[in-house]
Image (tube, helix red, strand yellow):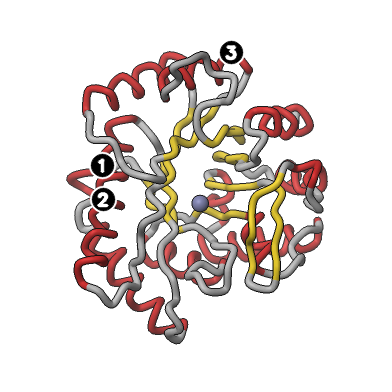
Amino acid sequence: MLHFAVAGSPFSTPKPGGTVEGLKQARKLGISAMEIEWVQNVPNNVERMREIRSVAQYLDIFLTVHAPYFINLNSPDKLKLAASKKRILAALSMAEIAGARSVCVHAAFNLGLPPAKVYDNVRRAVEDILKKKARDFPHVNLALETMGKPSQFGTLDEVLRISKEFSIYPCVDFAHLHARAQGKLNSKEEWDELLDQYEDGLGKSALKEMHIHYSGIAFGPSGERKHLPLRESDAKWKDFLAVLKKRKVGGVLVCESPLMEEDVLLLKRTYD
Ligand SMILES: [Zn+2]
């Protein structure tokens, strides 16, 4: 089964908002999943996490988390690297308590280093983080995200390779890949090939539990510029849904459109 998730509390959530109210509003709208946006910081209120968990369970809402943006697992600065790992670990641990299944992370900036060197640095940091998995986040996946700029770590090859090594799965942001590839990856044939590559990397059953990001996207020579509403972009979103359906892709598709629930529902209704 494929859930369609809103990226944060829906716009239409009654004031004062918050994740719990957002979950209720999502359910009211017929949305069955939410990505909680801890992109500025990770909360540390355990009681609040337990409340999110029980409300999401009661409403049968599938949860994922977006980790903070301030992360660079390729930083040469030891303090910055340690702070990055700490933020990821905090997001994973709180996600465990909140009942979220997967946490996506923008892993690193390349900083002009050769890709092999960056890969090594990210790999080492991921290995460190996962040492705490059994104790702190046994039910949560660490999803390294495919990124929209060539200056960032996160080609599909890179995130698949590292995921395979550690038995985790990545967050495949198809909009980022489209931007990074300067407009390619916007057709049924290309998506089919991409999913073949995903299966080759992580196994046949991996398609049944994917963490996907999707939206329209604007891009320039240096890749991603900003996310766009589906209908104001070049995204062939109906074709995309057809491929997901044909390949029986499961898990969650988080729609990162600026229109929030409007585009989530557009995708969900079209898919159904
Ligand atoms: Zn992201």
Q: Mark 3 and mark 1: span between their CA atoms?
A: 29 Å
Q: Secondary structure at mark 2?
A: helix
Along the viewing direction, whichever of 94 and 156 lies nearer the viewer: 94
Q: Secondary structure at mark 1?
A: helix
Residue 258 in percent (x, y) is at 64, 39
Which residue is nearer to you in this view: 89 or 130?
89
Q: Is residue 63 left or right of residue 138?
A: right
Task: Please state the horizontal and vertical placement of residue 208, each as a whole percent of the image.
Answer: 57, 44
Earlier in the chain: of badge 3 and badge 2, it is 3
Give the vertical position of 176 relative to 211 (above or below): below
Is 225 displayed left or right of 66 in the figure?
A: right
Q: Which residue is mark 2?
A: 89
Q: Nearer the viewer, residue 179 or 104?
A: 179
**From mark 3 to mark 2, how far is it between C-alphas?**
32 Å
Q: Which residue is mark 1?
A: 93
Could you tell me which residue is drawn at 63 percent across and 17 percent down? 29
The crowding category of the residue bearing disc 2, from other C-alpha atoms within 10 Å (few below 14, some 14 to 19, many at least 20), is many
State the residue position of label 3: 28
Pinpoint residue 117: horizontal percent, then vertical percent. Answer: 38, 83
Asked which quadrant contains residue 65, the reply is top left
Q: Callout 3, which amino acid?
A: Lys
Disc assigned to residue 66: none
Q: Are marks 1 and 2 in contact (CB under 8 Å)?
A: yes
